[in-house]
Image: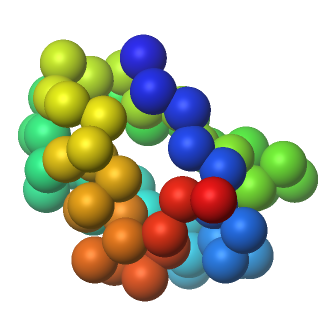
Amino acid sequence: MHEFQLPSMTCGHCAARVNRALKQADPACAVEVDMAQRRVVVKSHEDRAVLAEALADAGYAPA
């Protein structure tokens, strides 16, 4: 399980883009978004660096 703080995730559209980016990196992952905390928890067997890169490529670089 990986947890990321995403300061630039500010709305539902952002959350959808984050979810889509993570699913492209690992189609089998489970994503939980906490908009209030600007946090995402990802249950994935993929390496953390791969997921962080997918988020950054989508415009939501982890803090």
For this view, does 17 lie left or right of residue 23?
right
Who is closer to the viewer here, 55 or 10? Answer: 55
Residue 40 drawn at (x, y percent): 58, 43
How many tags in the picture? 0
Screen quadrant of the C terminus:
bottom right
Residue 16 drawn at (x, y percent): 46, 66
Tell me what residue is drawn at x 66 percent, y 50 percent: 5
Q: Residue furthest right?
A: 36
Residue 41 drawn at (x, y percent): 54, 32
The reply to whether residue 20 is visible in this rendering is no
Name the colour scheme. Answer: rainbow
Q: Is residue 60 above or below residue 54?
A: below
Tell me what residue is drawn at x 12 percent, y 40 percent: 27
For this view, does 3 lie left or right of residue 2?
right
The reply to whether residue 55 is visible in this rendering is yes
Residue 35 drawn at (x, y percent): 76, 55
Tell me what residue is drawn at x 26 percent, y 44 percent: 49
For this view, does 61 lie left or right of residue 9?
left
Who is closer to the viewer here, 11 or 57? Answer: 57
For this view, does 57 lie left or right of residue 4?
left
